[in-house]
Image (tube, rainbow, N blue to C red):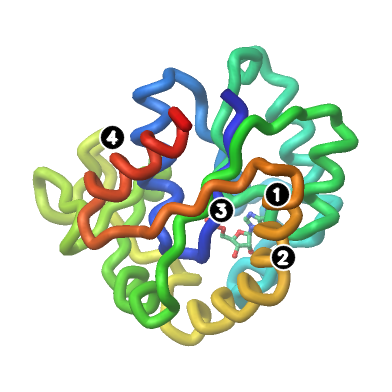
Amino acid sequence: MKLILLGAPGAGKGTQAEIISETLRIPTISTGNIIREALKSGTELGRKAKGYMDSGQLVPDDIVIGIIRDRLAQPDCADGFILDGFPRTIPQAEALDRMGVAIDRVIEIEVADDTIARRVSGRRICPGCGSSYHVDYKRPTVEGICDRCGDTLVQRQDDRPDTVRERLSVYHEQTEPLKSYYAAAGKLFVVEGQEEIADTSRLVLAALEQ
Ligand code: AMP
């Protein structure tokens, strides 16, 4: 199964990707996580991406396309994968097509903008392993500590309200056109993001079986 998860920042793509990844035993590839990792380790990619990420803009297409090309060539992607946060522009989707990657399904998790703003403010991430939590919807066992690796959870710099507003407008302008792109290819399934994570998962997993 080669799957794309589409949706605004904070719609729950990362959380649903974790659940599908465990269910189908295929890796999740999150360009956001790869870029954050590069920022943390101070690589050239991190230095190039920092300004864009901090201001809520998209990192240029050629950079993220290069990241995806390298990552999809890894052996663990042979039996399928979940793309979380890629593609985010039409040229990125076209590049994926040109790479010969035959996507089976695109699931869009739809959440209203005012709900997004509320959800994102409660999101916390683990700087160690990239796992995502939420102060109301997905609390770690010990407050402020990652269940998986024990690191201290933090709020993402780009989850501050001003940057979220910018990211949402970037989403509507540059990423939303992908819905028509994949609908035209007969691959788009739209799932309404629910209040509870498990309810959204049921809808996502049902869409995978259709
Ligand atoms: P995310 O963790 O998916 O919300 O991504 C965080 C940030 O990383 C985005 O706001 C962009 O600056 C950058 N980014 C992640 N994926 C992409 C992509 N496919 N294209 C361009 N920029 C991206």
Q: Position of residue 17 (x, y in %)?
A: 43, 39
SS at mark 1? helix
Q: Is residue 53 above or below residue 97?
A: below
Q: Position of residue 125 (x, y in %)?
A: 35, 54
Alpha carbon separation for disc pair 1 and 4? 36 Å
Mark 3, mark 4: which one is toward the viewer? Answer: 3
Give the mark, 4 or 2, whose residue is nearer the N terminus: 4
Label 4–label 2 contact, CB within 8 A? no
Q: Amino acid at mark 4?
A: Cys
Q: Amino acid at mark 3?
A: Leu
Q: Amino acid at mark 2?
A: Pro
Give the mark, 2 or 3, whose residue is nearer the N terminus: 3
On whether ligand 1 comes within 8 Å of the CB at mark 1, the answer is: no
What is the residue that sits farthest to the right in this orientation?
A: 98
- Report the residue at 64% width, 30% height from top: 104
Alpha carbon separation for disc pair 1 and 3? 10 Å
Residue topped by disc 1 = 182
Residue 58 visible from this viewpoint = yes
Alpha carbon separation for disc pair 4 and 2? 37 Å
SS at mark 4? loop
Instruction: In this rendered view, identify the residue nearer to me: 130 or 200.
Output: 200
Q: Position of residue 159 (x, y in %)?
A: 43, 71
Mark 1, mark 3: which one is toward the viewer? Answer: 1
Alpha carbon separation for disc pair 2 and 3? 11 Å
Q: Is residue 167 above or below residue 3?
A: below
Give the mark, 1 or 3, whose residue is nearer the N terminus: 3
Residue topped by disc 3 = 6
Label 2–label 3 contact, CB within 8 A? no
SS at mark 3? strand
Residue topped by disc 2 = 177
Q: Residues within 10 Å of mark 3 (few under 14, many from 20)?
A: many
- Report the residue at 77% width, 29% height from top: 101
